[in-house]
Amino acid sequence: ELIISQFKNVLWIDSQQNVGFGRANNIGLKEAQGDYVVLINSDVELFENSILLTLDHLKSIPNPNKVGFVGCKIVHRDGAPQPSCNYWNPGIRELLEANALVIKFWQRILKRKILHDIDKYARLDENHEVTHLGVPFVICTREAIQENYFDENFFMYFEDCELNARMSIKGLKHYYFSGTSVYHHIGASNKDNEKRDRQIFASRLLYIKKRYSALYYRFFVLIFKFNLFLDGLADSSHLTTKKHKVWLKVYNKKVNEISGVPNESLNTYSDVLQEF
């Protein structure tokens, strides 16, 4: 009521329930009338003119009709950078980089840092094209986003990865802009760690299933289980395979109530978790 009373030009849409990140964004995107769209998380704080600066950069990119998302630098309150972009799509590579045996071989034998840790922060001070951008704060043309809505089978997490990949397949390119920053209060919108971890896990599996072949998906699950086994051997306080199965049973019963994903869909969380 406060927003409606003080900002007459704002269209307030009351969904009555938490329908999930992607679905909620789609509701607003379908009502958008301007030439450009800004997606901003509820836990993001603007402290400079980041919208206009990022928009100006988008307009300066050659062939703007081929531009997907444009994002800027994401930082903590103390100014420390957060990973704002990535140079490959999530998949088996990141599982291998999280594997205890691979880490030991790469760091101790080859005496090098894991490549994933280097890439995330290597080019945050330069403008460049990226594989995908997280969506705490991004700008795009209305045409680009209304031809590529978020996949509503995702309740939360990885819907941005899926949308970035789908836009790239259609020939759109994503760009990182270093000329401005926004604060991102990580986790402010979801403080239930166990629930969040279950959601991330389920969404990761759904993303892999949608993005890659059935063989790739099976191999991904195999490596994931092996990583959990190694974690359990290394430290009993880590997430073990047994504990994960308990989480999955609980989550599998409640996921449709939480997200509203239809049971008949072959790509629902329930189907993915049952296969796992």
Image (cartoon, rainbow, N blue to C red):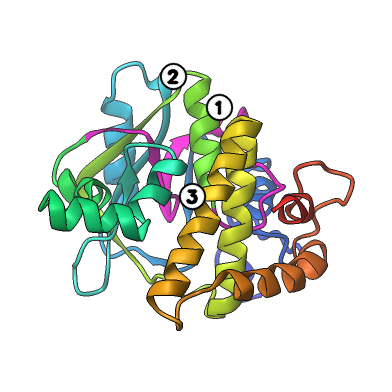
Taking the view exactly as shown, the residue that stands out farthest to the bottom is 237
Which residue occupies the foreground of this view, 100 or 133?
Answer: 100
Give the percent coordinates (x, y) of residue 155: 67, 57
Mark 1 to mark 3: distance in Å? 14 Å
Q: Which residues are magenta?
A: 128-157
Please report contact status of discs 2 and 1: CB closer than 8 Å, yes or no. Answer: yes
Indicate which disc residue 44 carries: none
Give the percent coordinates (x, y) of residue 126: 15, 40
Residue position marked by numbered label 1 in the rendering = 143
Q: Secondary structure at mark 1?
A: helix
Does residue 90 appear anywhere in the picture?
no
Residue type, numbered disc 3: Leu
Q: Earlier in the sequence, mark 2 or mark 1?
A: 2
Residue type, numbered disc 1: Glu
Give the percent coordinates (x, y) of residue 221: 58, 49
Q: Residue at x 63, y 73 (%)?
A: 242
Mark 2 to mark 1: distance in Å? 9 Å
Residue 41 as seen in the image, left or right of residue 80? right
Indicate which disc residue 39 carries: 3
User: Is 35 located above or below residue 219 in the figure?
Assistant: above
Tally of marks: 3
Residue 143: name its quadrant: top right
Q: Secondary structure at mark 3?
A: strand
Which residue occupies the foreground of this view, 86 or 104?
Answer: 104
Mark 2 to mark 3: distance in Å? 18 Å
Residue 263 as seen in the image, left or right of residue 12? right
Residue 211: name its quadrant: top right
Q: Residue at x 81, y 41 (%)?
A: 266
Give the percent coordinates (x, y) of residue 111: 10, 53
